[in-house]
Image (cartoon, coloured by chain):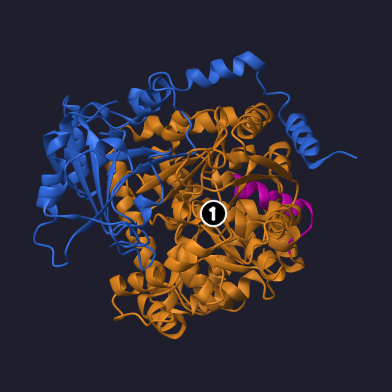
Chain colours: A blue, B orange
Amino acid sequence: MMTAREQILQAVRDASRRQESAGDNVALEAGRLLEGIESCRPALPSVDVVGSFMARAAGPKVGASIDRIASLSLLPSAVGRYLAGRSKSAEIVLQPTAPLLGLDWSGAGVSRGENVDDGIAVGLARWGIAETGSVVFHSSRDTPILQAFLCALHIVAVPARGIVAHLDDYALAARYAGDPAPRNACLITGASGTTDIEGSLVKGAHGPRELHIIVVDNGIPS
Amino acid sequence: MRVDVPPFKSRAKAALGDAVLKTAIDRTAGNAEKKRAIAVGDFPQFPAARVRGRQIKDHVVANLGHYLVEFEQNAIRSGAKVHWARTSEEASRIVIDICRAAGAKRVTRSKSMLGEEIGLPHALETAGIERVETDLAEHIVQLAGETPSHIVWPAMHKTREQVATLFNAKHAVRPDSDAIPDLVASARRDLRKKFLTADVGISGANFLIADTGAVCTVTNEGNAELTTTPPRVHIVTAGIEKLVPSVDHAFALLRLLVRSATGGDFTQYTTFHCGPKRPDDADGPEEFHIVLVDNGRTRMLGEGLAEMLRCIRCGACMNHCVVYRQIGGHAYGATYPGPMGSVLTPVIDGLAKSHDLPNACTLNGRCAEVCPVEIPLPTLLRGWRDKSWKEGLEPLTVRAGIGIWAYFACHPRLYRPATAISVRWMRLFSKGGRISWMPLAGGWTEYRDFPAPQRSTFISSYRAMRKGSQQ
């Protein structure tokens, strides 16, 4: 008796024998379908990729707030500035990654905590994508995925040199970095939202209510 | 999977009489239609992207066997377990077996229409496993004991007032008010703990990436990642047509999917899941299962419905369908409503049970106009009509009526005097140029009138004209 796998593959082959391309040709054809993709994707508003990213992320479609600092050492004060004036005493949970843990947070007017559930998370994204205004995280030892989803306020630092123009450029960069398929690659494009009740947009559905992005020009080791 | 008793016509009639339903559909679908138009207007490359999207899907469908094997190999390499299911029953059984082996008491589920198609909610209930729907709309539908009425907005049939009543009755802590933001906050509060205490998380897949073995999910709420990360086991159920060659091809299709579905440019959360937790990962599931489901798809491939396998489930066809906008999703009595549903349901449930659906269409062509992968939906619907006629599934009255008309239409010498008589007969009932009642036309005139025909038939006017011009 044939297994489900054999039977499905047999049925597929019986049905598509006439159109199917031979082994190597499939890859060639797939590659050809990506040629001239420039004509099938939105153009950036300017040649300045970082500027385009910032405009996009702060624009109405993404709705994040945005800041830019010259160096990573300025991150604690940028975070403190963003959180100043909030009623609750700000307690932040850092993504457990060396560049963030190594900063001096003492003078920033924030305290460090452990509980990220409905709290404030500070993360370090690897890439930014100007086309969509997304920041990208790859799961790893120092990048827990849940942090980005459990917090109520997500503050994300992204290195300026990790910002690429288009989605396809991110795919290429991830391949070049030798990390094309981590367990999770998360493209985050704004705060959590829903339009499930009468199509009306509400932020903070299950994940963060707010997303604050800080572009860092220098000082993040690759 | 649904056991529906009343036939389509009575369901449609009941839906047409429901004023609240009409309001609910108009609020969401109307919004979606407007937002899509703006998003597509802002994307001048849309027509080119659409052609490319169609080509990518056609390439995958033509080489489906190749991509299935490639995907399977790469998924296994990433540590995933790959299962194959021929039917909905087989797929549900595989999922339940995995849940049982994991000793699961509570399962969280991120919205997946394929899960609905294979009857997973029902199967979990029968197996005595607590099911927690985490998509806000699915949560509403679950609390109400209903089924989804739209593939993108499953609770489209509910007004905010109805949701408020439901949450006040069912949530442990009542919403702060009946305003939509407070209703959303109430669902967040209710579901947060459940996310963290589930034993198994089940998701669908928007794309299966052949060259890495990864699975792509898109949500705006972030519920997919909250469903798939904390539990020990993650199960993906996906139709075999979801394959794409690489992540780059997925991006090309995502540009079309999101704009067509919600009018956004990109979903808030687009995540690729590849295998279980790696040895030094900070979090993630220990087991990762992928169930590849056929359930009629290979039959579609062999029986002239390959074009339908392009479908990326954006829902634009239903948002723009004049019939869907009047009757909503439940009247279709199937997992997939609207134009795409009327093509798919006869495959899944059999034409004998669903031959009314391809007829619930005006053939105005709007669905094909907005489809991001150029599926010729009206043509496919006409194909089902043809098949239904050939298989003798249409009722005797319809067959007899069309038979009589066809006889006259094939005999012009009879047809012309017959139409001349009909025109005179119809004009007897005309009041001020409109007919609001006429014997044998009750089905039409019960709800609307129609214009009275002109005094003479086309052929007699034509002859008179030719005579005039010859003189």
Q: Is residue B387 magenta?
A: yes
Residue B264 horizontal/vertical position (percent): 32, 48
Q: Is residue B125 visible?
A: yes
Q: Secondary structure at mark 1?
A: helix
- The quarter of the picture where the C terminus of chain B appears is top left
Seen as rendered, the residue at the extreme right is: A1
Q: Is residue B442 magenta?
A: no
Residue B288 horizontal/vertical position (percent): 60, 45
Look at 56% across and 42% down and name the residue there.
Answer: B276
Number of callouts? 1
Q: Which residues are magenta?
A: B380-394
Closer to the camera, B131 or B452? B131
Overall secondary structure of the magenta stretch?
Answer: helix
- The quarter of the picture where the N terminus of chain B appears is bottom right
Q: Vertically, is A59 above or below A7?
A: below
Q: Vertically, is B329 above or below A5?
A: below
Residue type indicated by callout 1: Pro
Residue A207 horizontal/vertical position (percent): 35, 58
Q: Residues within 10 Å of mark 1 (few under 14, many from 20)?
A: many
Look at 67% across and 16% down and name the residue there.
Answer: A22
- The chain letter under disc 1 is B
Residue B311 horizontal/vertical position (percent): 54, 43
In the picture of the structure, the residue carrying the numbered disc 1 is: B339
Closer to the camera, B74 or B458? B74
Q: Is residue B322 left or right of residue B4?
A: left
Q: Is residue A164 visible?
A: no
